[in-house]
Image (spheres, rainbow, N blue to C red):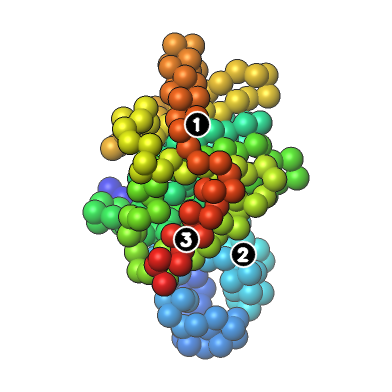
Amino acid sequence: MTNGRLSTLEFLGAELRRARKEAGLSREDLAQQINYSPSLVGMVEIGHRTPSQDFIARVDAELRAGGLFERLLTLVRADAAPPWLREWISVEKEATLIRWFEPSLVPGLLQTEAYARAVLAWGGLLRQSEIEQRVTSRLSRQTILSADTPPQFVALLDEAVLHRAVGEPALMVEQFDYLAQVSEWPHVHLHVMPFGAGAHAGLAGPFILAKTPDGSEVVHLDNQLRAHITDGSEDVDTLQRKWEAMRGEALPRRASRELIQKAAKSWV
């Protein structure tokens, strides 16, 4: 709940709880019927976990809801991204080339669900339902990389990303195994900026450059509160020059993959 108002995820959970009780079912009963755990049913009902499409389809069928919960899940996904991020999501969907530099975290489009949840939980600033909705948004954004015509995606990661503990070791192994896997996709290029490169042009912070179908470039910059998006020619030119300077210092694709695989093993 935000400012006394139910989030769409919390509303879905409240409707699920109401429908379950009207059907005379306990959480355990419903869980058994849809072949999911009672704890997951409980988490969904209190807005602490975004349900999967399969979970919702089974709930709709079991409670004879006529597709109500599938429609509510659509609303949850549409409302998942914070308003200030929605403009950038539109840019991402249309981009033909995305160049992303990150000095401290795995880029959002390459994060596993567990890694994303751990990052969003830092500091305790978001309610659990808000964390879940933002995880949903992040995972939904990732589908552009598996689309029929995906953008060319090039990521530069500072080596510090490979050594920063975001969660338990198993979470880190999963994340870096996944990075190594996607680095083999033909349209995904990952490059690591090694510690040996010393100080470099990206230490001032992360940025993303997205090329649109008409050939223009849009820039995304993060700060502590929200994103800043601009297509100003001077800003674009400055970051393009920074990108080229860093790209020249980064490890080649194969060497970067080997370093990522080594990082995964170091967390075992």
Q: Residue at x 57, y 38 (%)?
A: 154
Q: Residues within 10 Å of mark 1 (few under 14, many from 20)?
A: some
Q: Is residue 264 or residue 188 the one in the foreground? A: 264
Measure the C-alpha gap from mark 2 to mark 3: 35 Å
- Which numbered marker is on residue 264? none
Q: Residue at x 60, y 81 (%)?
A: 34
Q: Amino acid at mark 2?
A: Gln
Earlier residue among tags 1 and 2: 2
Task: Please state which amino acid type lies under the numbered disc 1.
Answer: Arg
Residue 29 coordinates in the image, percent (x, y): 52, 88
Query: Between disc 2 and disc 3, whose residue precedes?
Result: 2
Q: What is the number of the mark on residue 53?
A: 2
Looking at the image, residue 249 lies above or below residue 41: above
Q: CA distance from mark 3 to mark 1?
A: 21 Å
Where is residue 95 shown, x and y percent of the image? 62, 31
Position in image of residue 62 (x %, y %): 63, 78
Residue tagged by mark 1? 247
Q: Quadrant of residue 265?
A: bottom left
Question: Which residue lies at the image location 47% right of the left edge and 76% below the top edge?
Answer: 41
Which quarter of the image is occupied by the C terminus?
bottom left
Q: Tell me if residue 175 can be seen.
A: no
Q: Could you give the CA–CA distance between mark 1 and mark 2, rounded to whole angstroms?
A: 40 Å
Q: Amino acid at mark 3?
A: Lys
Between discs 3 and 1, the one toward the N terminus: 1
Instruction: Find disc 3 in the rendering and name its residue.
Output: 262
- Does residue 153 appear left or right of residue 108 in this picture? right
